[in-house]
Amino acid sequence: MALVSVFLLAFIEISLPLPIVFVMDGPVEAAFLVIGLAGSLGSLFFIYLSQPIRRWVVRRYGMESLIIRRTERFMVRYGAAGVGLLAPMILGHAATAVGAVVLGAPTAKLAIWMIAGVVLWTLVYYVAFLMGGSLFGWEP
């Protein structure tokens, strides 16, 4: 049951299930594998779900609005790779995916880099989790 909760929370944000992982009795490796999988699936879900929102924003505000121009500068500076790799730390992978697609990011490139970012940050959380646990005498 704990892994289902971990999956549902990680689908929205990969840092949300970390307290559950800390107190659960099951294998920590399986929990972080579920976090990486759920985060990747959540990224894909929100990237492709946000296409209708993008059409509405363009219809409502047009491509020449101030928000679109500012975000376009951000996308030119950092690209889909920068946004995808930093997404879990910016606003979370779900909100960043929706925002990037609404503001014009190429979905295929964004999907690849978002999955890479989710996997990268899941590994960072896993290593930090193991190192932090060893500081307090906790063994997984």
Image: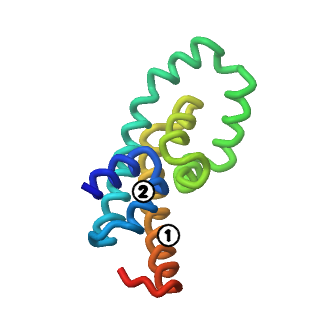
Percent coordinates x, y for residue 125 in the rendering: 48, 68
| Residue placed most toward the observer, 106 or 18 | 18
- The residue under label 2 is 17
Residue 22's quadrant in the figure? bottom left
| Residue placed most toward the observer, 119 or 79 | 119
Q: Disc 2 or disc 1, which is closer to the eye?
A: 2
Q: Residue furthest top?
A: 60
Rounded to the nearest angstrom, the CA distance separating label 2 from label 1 is 14 Å
Q: Secondary structure at mark 2?
A: loop
| Residue placed most toward the observer, 120 or 65 | 120
Q: Is residue 29 left or right of residue 12?
A: left
CB within 8 Å, label 2 to label 1: no
Q: Secondary structure at mark 1?
A: helix
Q: Which of the numbered marks, if any, corresponds to residue 124?
A: 1
Determine crowd level at label 2: few under 14, some 14-19, many 20+ residues with C-alpha closer than 10 A: many
Q: Is residue 113 left or right of residue 28?
A: right
Three-letter amino acid code of the residue under disc 1: Val
Q: Is residue 1 above or below residue 134?
A: above
Residue 71's quadrant in the figure? top right
Q: Is residue 77 left or right of residue 28?
A: right
Residue at point 61% right, 12% down?
A: 60
